[in-house]
Image (cartoon, rainbow, N blue to C red):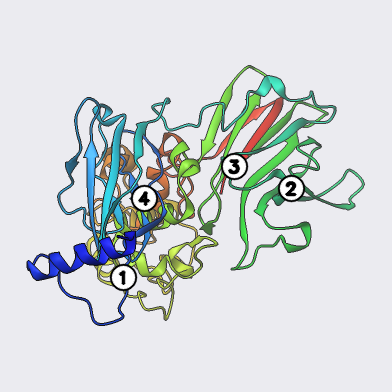
Amino acid sequence: MTEAFTVHALRGVLVSAGLLAALPAGAAPAAAPVITGQPQWQVLQVGQRAGFLVKADNATGYQWYAARPGSGPTAVPGGTAPFLLTAPAAQGDDGTQYSVIVTGPGGSTRSGTGTLYIGPNADGSPPDSVLAAAGDIPAARNVMTLAFLNASLGRVPDSQMFWSLQYRDGSGNTVKEAHSFAEKPYFDLPKVGGTRLYVYVAPDAASIGTGQKNYFDFLELNVGQDANNGPYWINMDTTRVDRWGLPVAFRLQCGDGTVVERGDDVGLFVDDRDVTLMKYQAELGSPWNAAAQQSWPYGIDEPGAAGFGKNGPYSGYYSSYIDEVWRVDGLTIPKPTNFLDLATQLPDLSGALNRHVAAVTGAFNPDGTLADKSFWSKHPPTSFYGAIPSNFYSAFWHEHAISHLQYGFPYDDDASQSSDVGCKKPQSLIVGVGF
C-alpha cells in the first residue's frame, strides 16, 4: 500500500465517521498557517507597555500566551489579534515570555517566544552596547569629537547610515559635511553656532533627504565660545517638535567629568519600526492612530502636520478646551487657529494647554502671561496629559525618552521637561542612531 493511498484511506475513514468534512472533488486540503514574522524581544522601563507582533499567512485566529519566570504559559485575556499590547510592566515581569497560537482552516501553529526584559538602567538610558564608552573616541583638535554609532541592532549596515552638518567657518564660508557612518564615524567639530545635525538611513548618499518619504531625524546644537577666547561651550537637544523618524540618543562628555544622556530610551532602539507604530496607535487610540499613518513607515508627524492642524479632520480636537481656558482664565488674546499655535510667544500658556492643566482661575493674566508664579510647582509632571484633550503625541515621546525628558512641542522646556542640556569645555558627543 502506497503512502498516498494510506493518507486517502485514512481521510475516507474520518469522513465516514463524521470526524472530518468531505472536500469537494479535486480540492486540496486547506493550508496550515505559516508564521512569517516572529514576536521579538522587548526592553522596557517599569510602567511601560510591551508590544508583541506576529505575522502569519493563512491565519484567521490568534491567542497569545504569557509565561512568567518559573511558570508555564497561560492565555492572555483579550489577546486575540496579531498585535498584543501588554499591561504596564512591573519589575517582576522581567523575563516573561510571550508566544501566540495562530489558527486557520488548515490547523494551528505556535510561534516562537518574545521575551519582556526590564532595562538595566532605571531611567531608560541605553547600555554601552547602544552608546559606546567615551574613552574609545579620539581626542579633539578643535572643540570636541563627534562619534556616530550604528545602534540599529544589525538592521542597517554602517554604509547605509549617514550624517550631515552645515555651518559657517571662521572666515564666514558655508561648510557642508555629509558622510556615511562607515566613511567617517568620527568628526573633529569646530565652533558651528546654532545648527542641526541630521542623521539618515538610505541605500546610498544620493538618496538621503528630509522629505516625507525619507528616513531621517536631527538634533539641535549650538557650539560657541565665551568672550575674549574663553572656554568653548555646547547647548543641544533631541527634539520631537517636528516628527519622529529614527531612534536617536546621545551621550555628552564634558570637561568637568559630567556625562549626560538624552534622547529615545533603549526600548525604541530595540523595537521593530512596525511595533513602534502599533504601540503608538494602541496606546493613544483614536484619532491619533489614524494621524500616525500619514508618513509611515518613514516617521510619525507632529499633530499640527498630521490632521490636527487648520482645516484638518481633527482640527476641532482642542476647540472646547480652548474655549474653557479662555473663559476660566479671562484671556483676551486671540485663540489659536492652528494646533495650539499662539499668535505670540507664551511658553507657560503653551505648555499648560498641551498638558491639559491650563483651566485654572488666576493662573494667567488676560494677555496670556503667567500670573501665578508657583503654577508649575502646583502642577507637577504627574498631572500632565491626564485628560482629553491633551497632546498625547508629546506624552508618548516623553514616556519613551531617557529620564522621560524630550521636546514634544514648542516650549516643552517649561517645568524642566525638555531634553535640552549644555556644558562648558565639551570633550565628546556620541550620537547613537537606530532604525
**In the rendered image of this protein, does residue 58 appear above or below residue 381?**
below
| Residue at the limit of the structure toward the front, as seen here | 1
User: Residue 142 sits in which quadrant?
Assistant: top right
Q: CA distance from mark 3 to mark 1?
A: 40 Å
Q: CA distance from mark 3 to mark 2?
A: 12 Å
Q: CA distance from mark 3 to mark 4?
A: 29 Å
| Residue at the limit of the structure toward the left, as seen here | 17
Query: Pointer 1: what residue?
Result: 317
Q: Marks 3 and 1: CB-CB under 8 Å? A: no
Q: Residues within 10 Å of mark 4 (few under 14, many from 20)?
A: many
User: Residue 366 sits in which quadrant?
Assistant: bottom left
Asked whether, in this view, residue 183 is left or right of residue 43, the answer is: right
Residue type at the position of mark 2: Ser
Query: Pointer 4: what residue?
Result: 395
Q: Residues within 10 Å of mark 1 (few under 14, many from 20)?
A: some
Of pointers 1 and 2, the one earlier in the residue sequence: 2
Residue type at the position of mark 4: Ala
